[in-house]
């Protein structure tokens, strides 16, 4: 999400773009050995290393999977991860799973799990496609949040996303790649839980929703970013959005977080969950704070983001 974080949940438009890396999901159906129908779920990171390996008996019951964890080879993930997978499987129609058959579902990330690029949203979008489910409903029931990330994973294109009467809405939006040609995404190797972050500011967001002046301010700035056709206007709008949201929600900007000074003509904005995941910087800022940024990996925006 380039702009609109948090406030998207109260009706402000968010601007989001897909990245060039994602997540694969492969499903195999085979005859059940010994007449015991099962689903085996194996998740691999970008290096091909298993980070989750779970096995579930069919038909799926109502067991407390966080406690009674079975696993195929001792590489079970945390109870929370197992429970999320179990609930997702339960969301599929029972006719998805045939009697006498077992299933192996394997996922493979193309990006680092700690990058914040959307391991959960791409998983939900993939499974919804396989099981012929509504991805937004699945997302809401499993993880909460606005659903913008699942929408991007479904569409695979830039979009403007908003919620109206608590229902997700989106339309086309694109960013001219000539504008962000000197932008970089800095990975902070400190993945934040965006749902937990949202929960921490929920009360303040509800106050803003009932504050016509502040809500209008946020909507105006987000709208200015959406319509910007010059890089100076775009970057100024992003900085203004971040400052306004920081003031409204009592959250630190990256300048405050890192104890660094803004730079004239510079851009430094949180991406992903506030206070972690990633930074968006331009060349002017990167040159002025090269020492601070040298501790982290960075990728040019136009290499990471799909045109």
Image (cartoon, helix red, strand yellow):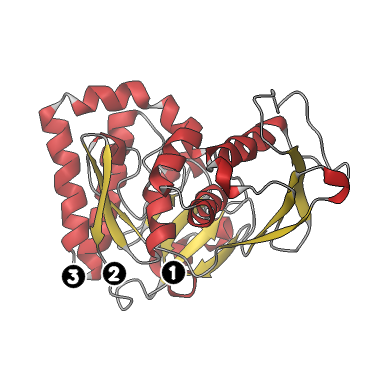
Disc 2 element:
loop
Q: CA distance from mark 1 to mark 3?
A: 18 Å
User: What residue is pinned by disc 2?
Assistant: 175
Identify which residue, 59 or 234, lies in the foreground.
59
Residue 214 is drawn in which quadrant? top left
Instruction: Point out the tag, 2 or 1, that comes first from the N-terminus.
Output: 2
Residue 22 is drawn in which quadrant? bottom right
User: What residue is pinned by disc 1?
Assistant: 305
* Closer mark to the observer between disc 3 and disc 2: 2
Whether label 1 touches label 3, CB < 8 Å: no
Disc 1 element:
loop
Q: Is residue 295 left or right of residue 7?
A: right
- Which residue sits at x=55%, y=65%? 298
Whether label 3 touches label 2, CB < 8 Å: no
Q: Position of residue 288 (x, y in %)?
A: 45, 63
Give the numbered dot on residue 229: 3
Disc 3 element:
loop
Instruction: Point out the tag, 1 or 3, that comes first from the N-terminus.
Output: 3
| Residue 42 visible to an observer of this rendering | no
Q: Position of residue 70 (x, y in %)?
A: 81, 34
Q: Residues within 10 Å of mark 2 (few under 14, many from 20)?
A: some
Q: Is residue 133 left or right of residue 224?
A: right
Whether label 2 touches label 1, CB < 8 Å: yes
Residue 199 is drawn in which quadrant? top left
Identify which residue, 287 or 134, lies in the foreground.
134
Q: Position of residue 147 (x, y in %)?
A: 38, 45
């Amino acid at each position: 999400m380039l702009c609109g974080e948090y406030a998207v949940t109260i009706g402000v438009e968010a601007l989001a773009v897909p990245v060039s890396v994602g997540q694969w999901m492969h499903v195999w159906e085979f005859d059940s050995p010994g007449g015991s129908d099962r689903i085996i779920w194996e998740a691999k990171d970008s290096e091909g290393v298993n980070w989750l390996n779970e096995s579930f008996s069919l038909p799926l019951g109502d067991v407390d999977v966080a406690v009674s964890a079975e696993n195929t080879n001792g590489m079970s993930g945390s109870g929370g991860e197992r429970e999320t997978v179990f609930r997702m499987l339960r969301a599929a129609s029972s006719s998805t799973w045939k009697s006498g058959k077992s299933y192996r579902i394997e996922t493979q990330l193309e990006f680092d799990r700690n990058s914040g690029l959307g391991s959960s949203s791409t998983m939900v979008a993939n499974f919804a496609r396989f099981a012929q489910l509504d991805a937004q409903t699945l997302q809401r029931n499993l993880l909460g949040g606005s659903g913008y990330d699942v929408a991007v994973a479904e569409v695979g294109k830039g979009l403007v996303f908003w919620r109206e009467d608590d229902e997700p809405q989106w339309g086309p939006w694109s960013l001219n790649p000539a504008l962000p040609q000197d932008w970089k995404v800095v990975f902070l190797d400190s993945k934040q839980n965006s749902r937990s972050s949202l929960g921490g500011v929920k009360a303040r967001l509800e106050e803003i929703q009932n504050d016509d002046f502040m809500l209008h301010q946020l909507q105006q700035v987000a709208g200015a970013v959406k319509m910007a056709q010059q890089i100076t206007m775009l970057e100024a709008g992003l900085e203004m959005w971040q400052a306004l949201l920081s003031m409204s929600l009592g959250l630190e900007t990256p300048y405050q977080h890192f104890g660094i000074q803004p730079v004239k003509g510079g851009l430094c904005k949180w991406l992903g969950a506030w206070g972690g995941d990633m930074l968006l910087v331009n060349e002017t800022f990167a040159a002025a704070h090269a020492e601070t940024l040298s501790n982290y990996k960075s990728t040019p925006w136009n290499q990471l983001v799909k045109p």
